[in-house]
Image (cartoon, rainbow, N blue to C red):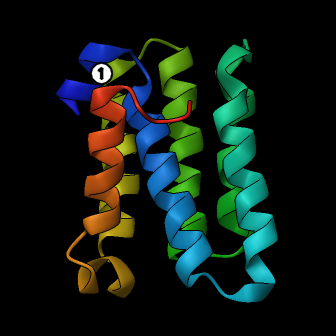
Amino acid sequence: MVVLENVRLGLTLEWVAECIKSLVVQAAPPESKESLLNWLARVTRTRDMADGSDLMDEARRVWHEKRDIFHTAISHLYAARAYLQQSNNSSYRSSVIRAANIIGDHDYYRQTALAIPLALFEQFTTGSAAT
C-alpha cells in the first residue's frame, strides 16, 4: 500500500478496484456481473465528488443490494473513497485494506495464489496500468 500511495494518493484504491473487477469477471454469478461492474465503474469515477457523505450513502446502497463478498468489498471501496475525499487517511487505508482482505479470501484468488492481484500490483507500481 505504501508503495502505491507514494506514487499517487488514491492509487491503492484503484489497484484494489482492478483486483475486484478481475474477480467479478472471473467468479461472480452471471446475474450479478453487470451490476457489480457498474458499481466499480462509478467508484473509480467519483474522484471529484465534493461530499464524502454521498459516497458513504453509496457504500450503504451497494452493501444492502446483496450482502456477498463482491458487494461487501465494493462497499468498502466507496467508504475508502469517501474517507480519501475527507482527508481521513487512517480510515481510508483501513477501508482499502478491508476490501483487499475480503477479496483475498475468495476461493478463486486463493487457488491462483493471488497471481492476478500481484500482476496488477506490478503494473500499478511500474506505471503500466491503464488508469
Name the foreground residue: 112 vs 53.
112
Q: Is residue 74 left or right of residue 91?
A: right
The residue beneath circle 1 is: 5
Q: Is residue 74 above or below residue 77?
A: below
Q: Quadrant of the N terminus?
A: top left
* Residue 57 placement (x, y as % from top left): 73, 41
- Quarter of the picture containing the C terminus is top right
User: Residue placed at 42% from the left, 42% from the top?
Assistant: 15
Q: Looking at the image, which residue sits at the far front?
A: 128
- Of the residues shown, which amino acid type is indicated by label 1? Glu
* Residue located at (73% from left, 74% from top): 33
Q: Position of residue 3 (x, y in %)?
A: 19, 26
- Please give the name of the residue rendered at 34% of the width and 55% of the height, measured from the top-left corner: 100
Q: Quadrant of residue 53?
A: top right
User: How far across and down, in percent of the image, does residue 31 sit?
Assistant: 80, 86
Q: Nearer the viewer, residue 19 or 39?
A: 19
| Residue 103 shows up from this direction | yes
Provide residue 49's location: percent of width, then percent of height.
74, 18
Depicted 107 relative to depicted 40: above or below: below
